[in-house]
């Protein structure tokens, strides 16, 4: 089977993306003068733009690869929350798992860009954990969706309060009972709450902070000790560590691979992790061996780094690159 046939098999996959969604807003314009009121530039506004961010960007990457994505989250029952649902639908992403709460504020990150320079970012957000009622509502919504045809679950954590320890543990337990694979792009707050997850994907910094070891990547013994500590606590099936310019590492039982990074003209690393977890999850869902999961996801992450801003993976470009470099 060539990689195009593998990608074609993604079309039948439905994936739940559970976590912190947000709107990335942009105010763009020109700067020609400084304000007389304070020593700050005056931006003559020319364009306003709103994009999906956070866990919703993972869903965008899934859709870009041909899969169906369902976002599960709790956001504010506010103007931005309604805009979030609208943006999801415009991007062919199901909002069936989105709960609007009167006690929650939708996260919006607004960037002011003048003369193509990033001048300031304004964050409007609420980062405390979901309350008990919201957690119960989210768990019940996910449980309901998992009764349907779901091929994988992605936990995408941005430390904004949606993925509480209770939410994480209960959803993993439900998925385990249904033999649905689960994957995680973690943050340190609930690093060891994901016990029993199928695939756990921290970056090197998150791994070191999570297990409490200090080492450089060249200290292979310490690196692999950190992975062992991780696995002892999490009891996860697959450890997938992104290593920046060193590529990626993947391990399942005694099988392990170091996959080097491909030489790229890096323009922007923003959003690369979202691409990696989405592509890795789809590869896992169709039953690819771990060395191919790592190779393909690593390549996908490198490709989006060649473009400025947060962009989703180009499926045709990935097919071309994979068939040229990996699938012989």
Image (cartoon, grey):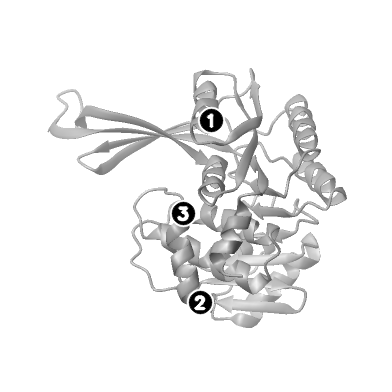
- Give the crowd class for mark 1: few <14, some 14-19, many >=20 residues within 10 Å: few
Pointer 3: what residue? 313
Which label is found at residue 260?
2
Q: Work out whether mark 1 precedes mark 3 in sequence or the reverse, and give the earlier one.
A: 1
Q: Which residue is drawn at 82% across and 42% down?
A: 170
- Between the C-alphas of marks 1 and 3, the distance is 19 Å
- Between the C-alphas of marks 2 and 1, the distance is 37 Å
Horizontal and vertical percent position of residue 147: 81, 38
Horizontal and vertical percent position of residue 88: 53, 32
Q: Quadrant of residue 73?
A: top right
Pointer 1: what residue? 89
- 116, above or below 185, in the image: above
Q: Is mark 2 on a helix, strand or loop?
A: loop
Q: In which quarter of the image is residue 138?
A: top right
- 301, above or below 105, in the image: below
Q: Which residue is drawn at 36% across and 32% down?
A: 49
Horizontal and vertical percent position of residue 136: 79, 29
- Between 311 and 320, the one lying in front of the other is 320
Horizontal and vertical percent position of residue 172: 79, 48
């Amino acid at each position: 089977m060539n990689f195009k046939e593998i990608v074609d098999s993604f079309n039948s996959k439905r994936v739940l993306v559970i976590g912190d969604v947000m709107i990335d807003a942009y105010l763009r314009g020109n700067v020609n003068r400084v304000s007389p009121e304070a020593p700050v530039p005056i931006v003559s506004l020319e364009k306003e733009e709103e994009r999906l961010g956070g866990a919703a960007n993972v869903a965008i990457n899934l859709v870009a690869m041909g899969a169906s994505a369902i976002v599960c989250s709790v956001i504010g029952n506010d103007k931005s929350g309604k805009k979030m649902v609208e943006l999801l639908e415009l991007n062919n992403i199901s909002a069936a798992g989105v709960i609007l709460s009167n006690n929650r504020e939708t996260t919006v990150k607004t960037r002011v860009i003048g003369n193509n320079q990033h001048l300031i970012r304004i964050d409007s957000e609420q980062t405390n954990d979901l309350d008990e009622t919201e957690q119960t509502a989210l768990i019940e919504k996910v449980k309901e969706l998992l009764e349907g045809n779901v091929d994988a679950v992605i936990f995408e954590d941005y430390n904004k309060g949606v993925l509480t320890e209770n939410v994480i543990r209960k959803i993993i337990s439900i998925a385990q009972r249904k033999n649905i694979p689960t994957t995680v792009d973690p943050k340190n707050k609930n690093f060891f709450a994901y016990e029993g997850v199928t695939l756990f994907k921290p970056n090197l910094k998150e791994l070191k902070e999570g297990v409490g070891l200090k080492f450089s990547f060249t200290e292979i013994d310490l690196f692999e000790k950190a992975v062992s500590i991780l696995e002892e606590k999490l009891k996860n099936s697959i450890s997938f560590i992104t290593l920046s310019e060193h590529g990626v590492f993947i391990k399942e039982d005694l099988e392990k691979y170091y996959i080097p990074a491909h030489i790229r003209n890096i323009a922007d690393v923003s959003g690369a992790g979202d691409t990696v977890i989405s592509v890795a999850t789809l590869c896992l869902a169709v039953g690819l061996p771990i060395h191919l999961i790592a190779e393909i996801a690593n390549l996908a992450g490198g490709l989006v780094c060649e473009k400025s801003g947060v962009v989703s993976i180009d499926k045709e470009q990935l097919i071309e690159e994979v068939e040229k470099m990996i699938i012989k």
